[in-house]
Image (cartoon, rainbow, N blue to C red):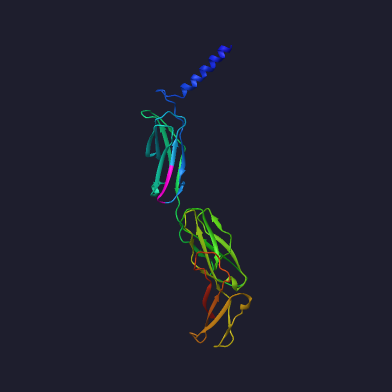
Amino acid sequence: MLFLAILLFSYCQMSQHIQKTTANGKEMLSNPKLVLVQGTLNVVMKQNVTLSCLSEPGSPPVRYTLFKHNQQVSALNRSDLTPALFTLTISSASDMGEYKCKAEYNNSSGGKYSNSLNITLIEPISKPVLSSPTSQAKKGQNVTLSCFSENGSLPITYLFFKGTQNISPQKTMQKREAAVIFLFIDSLSDFGTYKCKANNSFPNNTKYSNAFNFTLAEKFKSTRPSIGLTSTVNAEESENEVIYSEIEPVKPEEEYINFCVIRREEEKGNLEDPDLTENTCTTKLLQ
C-alpha cells in the first residue's frame, strides 16, 4: 500500500510538471503583470510614464509586447527573468487610453495577456466666473454667489473671498457644475469686492475669478433741493466710510448722487492675488 501511494504521488507530480511545460520543454508562461513604476496614470502633456511587464514563472527568453487599444506600441525581448520596461512620452490626446502587455515565447503561438492600465490626461482649468442672480442688495436680504470654471479636469475645488479673507470652506465639485454659497447682507460691511479661486490636480494652476460687487439698493433723500445729502443708513454702524457727492441735475425734476463704499482692511490674508481690494461706487437717481 505504501508503494502504491508513493507511485501515485510521483505520477501526480509528473503530470503537473508536464502541464506546466510547452511542447519544446519550456515552462508555460503565466499571465504577465503590468504595473506603473514611474510617473502617474493621470498625466499632463510632455510627461513620461514607465510601465513594467513581467510573467512569472517563465523560461527566458521571453518577448513582451505593449498594446494600446489592441494596437502594438513597442516590443522587447528579455533573456533573463527581469521585467520589460516601457517608457512612454505623453505628447497628444492619442496617447491616452487603455494599455496591456503580452508575454510569449519566440516562434510560438498564443501568449498571455496582462491586466490593463488606463492613462488619462489632466487638463488645466480656465479662469472661473463669479456671478449672482442680483447685483443690488439691501440690509436684511439673502443673496447667492456662484463660481464656475468651464474647462479643466474634474474634480475642481473652489474657494470664495471678500476682500482678502475667505468666507466659506472650500467646495470640491465632482461634476461640471458651479459651486454656490449663500450670504446674508447684514450691514454695509457686507458690501465690497468678492472673488473666488479654482484649482484642480493640474500642477501650479490656481486661477482667480473676476471681481463682483453688490450695490446698495436702499433709497437716499436730499436735505435741500441742491445742497447736501443724508443717508438712511448710519455709516457709523460699520468700519466703512460712506462718501456722498452731488451731481448737477440733468433735468429739473431729477437728482443724482455718487455713492461710494470704501472698505479698509485691517488685516490682510496670505493671498497671492494683489487685486483683492474693496472699493464700491455707483451713481443713483433720487426718486
Q: Main secondary structure of the magenta part?
A: strand
Q: Residue at x 52, y 17 (%)?
A: 10
Q: Can you say whether 48 is above or below 167 in the image?
A: above
Is residue 48 located in the magenta-colored stretch of the structure? yes
Could you tell me which quadrant the C terminus lies in? bottom right
Is residue 254 at all visible to an observer of this figure?
Answer: no
- In this picture, residue 193 sits left or right of residue 96: right
Q: How many marks on residues?
A: 0
User: Would residue 254 be counted in the magenta stretch?
Assistant: no
Work out whether 250 lies above or below 272.
Answer: below
Residue 201 location (% of width, % of height) = 49, 53
Instruction: Find residue 228 and report its image quarter.
Output: bottom right
Q: Is residue 200 above or below residue 162?
A: above
Residue drawn at point x = 47 percent, y = 23 percent: 19
- Expressed as whole percent of the image width and height from the top left, the position of residue 226 reads 54, 88
Can residue 101 be seen by looking at this rendering?
yes
Compared to 1, does 144 lie above or below? below
> Who is closer to the viewer here, 192 or 61?
61
Quadrant that contains the N terminus: top right
Looking at the picture, how far across and down is residue 109, in whole percent? 38, 28
Report the span colored magenta. 45-50
Could you say which is closer to the camera, residue 237 or residue 186? 237
Spot occupied by residue 248 in the image (x, y as percentages of width and height): 50, 86
